[in-house]
Image: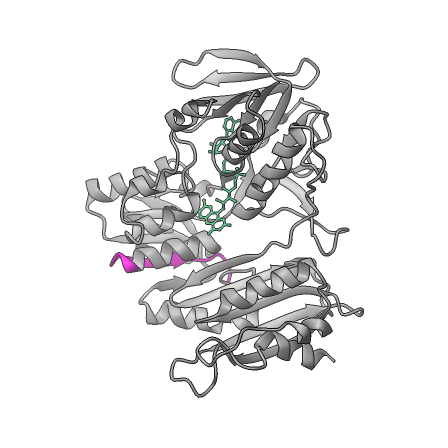
Amino acid sequence: MKVIVVGGVAGGMTTASQLRRIDSNAEIHVFEKGPHISFANCGLPYYLSREVESRSKLLERTPLDMEKRGIHVHVGHEVIHVDTDKKTVDVKVLDTGVIKSVSYDKLVLSPGGKSVILDSLKNVPQSFVLQQLHQLDSIESYIEAHNVKEVVVVGTGFIGLEVTENFVRRGFKVTVIQHNDNVYSPLETDMKGFMYESFKVQGVDLKLNSEIVKVVGDKAILKSGEEISAPLIIVAVGIKPNTGFLEGSNVSLEHGYIPVNEFGETSVKDVYALGDAILTHYAHVPEKPVSVALAWPAHRLAFVIAKHISGSTEFKHDGLLGTSIVEFFGYTIAQVGLSMKDLDEDTKYIDHTQGNIAGYMKNVENIQARVYYDDDGKILRGVFVGKKGVDKRLNTLAAFMRTDGNIKNLIHIEIGYAPPYGTTKDLLNMIGYKAI
Ligand code: FAD
């Protein structure tokens, strides 16, 4: 069996590795258009502050490592067309321009997303996106070559926040541009007062309702007419699925995303997809479609797909909760379940704020929580904000939502308690009591 994988990072490389583990005979080829495979996208912002001390730690595997495992990796190879009738892909070798046709028995698509670049920042030499290791290298080289000490970050999604924080840690003067007045839009408006405050405390110049209309030299002109210093600009305004090469392939797309079933199969037999480019559904509200551009879903579906390719239907993908967490200047922002835009406006919720540990302990910190639920008590969404212990509540709730998921039954979660770890009635228990 010959398996072709498109994309050699989170989803693609994990599928290839899982398959190799399960099936020692499969012939596996991975085509990656970039220069690297298996790098830690999630770690990239943390190199900017040297929280990740060495660049080499971001590179988890090389093509040579994979070759030793019998996985043929072809970097600098872009798949430009898929013919699902003939079961072939056209691959362009980027440094020669040569195009070759390669056959497959099974095809796995994990092309991820492409960072959106605003028109006003196209072809601007100091403007970068941060999605791949070579882009991090370009940013670092630019900083060194131009002795840069300040940066403008465009966008306040999780990558914008991480980039901002890590440049602050590096000692850079940071300006953040947000096109409206709503920073980090996934979080409830009334729960993010601390974010505006933190930008101020950290000396970040947050420019709300602002857009860059033009860059001239190392200055950016804003919509308001204001001219700001912009020797380096990082654009983090979202991604679009990298699925243009599937045009004319018979693989169905919805708004550019690839719908998949419980085995990661696309609309075409023997073609699978995973990662940021897919469209699936919420695990707890299956009638609602969702696309989750996070690492866990890619890794999880890689396993399901590898198993299915090798003939097992034992493991199924049953949707996602979109569990996410981000650090922001000492705070943690965490959420699970429906996004705010997928919730009905009048959905009921419980608000609760409680210490992460026993209130009499000197290091206690409050966690602010909100849990939304429907008329039957099914938990739809949970949000947590605080300085400590947020991840614990998030992950517990995520596990609970995968099993029972009824808000009243939160009272039954038997927590591990001693004063440095929690309270006798944990925040999650209290939300359950409040819902009864
Ligand atoms: P990718 O890992 O992006 O891999 C896709 C690969 O396919 C790319 O290398 C691309 O070059 C290649 N490709 C695309 N088209 C073609 C083609 N036609 N031919 C050949 N190759 C092609 N997630 C979290 O859960 N937590 C985090 O903290 C987190 N932090 C992040 C920080 C940053 C800076 C970034 C960029 C992402 C972060 N993510 C995080 C998201 C996570 O990295 C992605 O969800 C995950 O990598 C998606 O895997 P994927 O395989 O779909 O795409």
- Image quadrant holding the N terminus, namely top right
In-front residue for pair 324/2? 2
* Above-or-below relation of 87 to 312: above
Kindly tell me whether residue 331 is visible in this rendering.
yes
Q: Where is residue 259 in the image (x, y as percent from the top left)?
A: 69, 38
Whether residue 372 is situated above or below residue 359 in the rendered picture: above
Q: Residue at image x 55%, y 26%?
A: 5
The residue positioned 59% from the left and 43% from the top of the image is: 300
- 416 relative to 289 in the view: left or right: left
> Residue pushed farthest right?
376
Would you say 121 lies left or right of 423 here?
A: left
49 left or right, relative to 341:
left
Identify the residue shown where x is 69% and y is 24%.
270
Q: Give the range drawn in magenta.
A: 169-181
**Residue 45, image x and y in percent?**
37, 50
Whether residue 174 is in magenta: the answer is yes
As displayed, is residue 366 above or below residue 379? below
Is 106 colored magenta in this rendering? no
Left or right: 113 as drawn, with respect to 75: right
Q: Position of residue 237 (x, y in %)?
A: 48, 49
Q: Is residue 69 above or below residue 365?
A: above
Classify residue 269 by image quadrant. top right
* Quarter of the figure with the C terminus: bottom right
Q: Which of 4 and 253 is in front in this view?
A: 4
Colouring chosen for the image of the structure: one colour
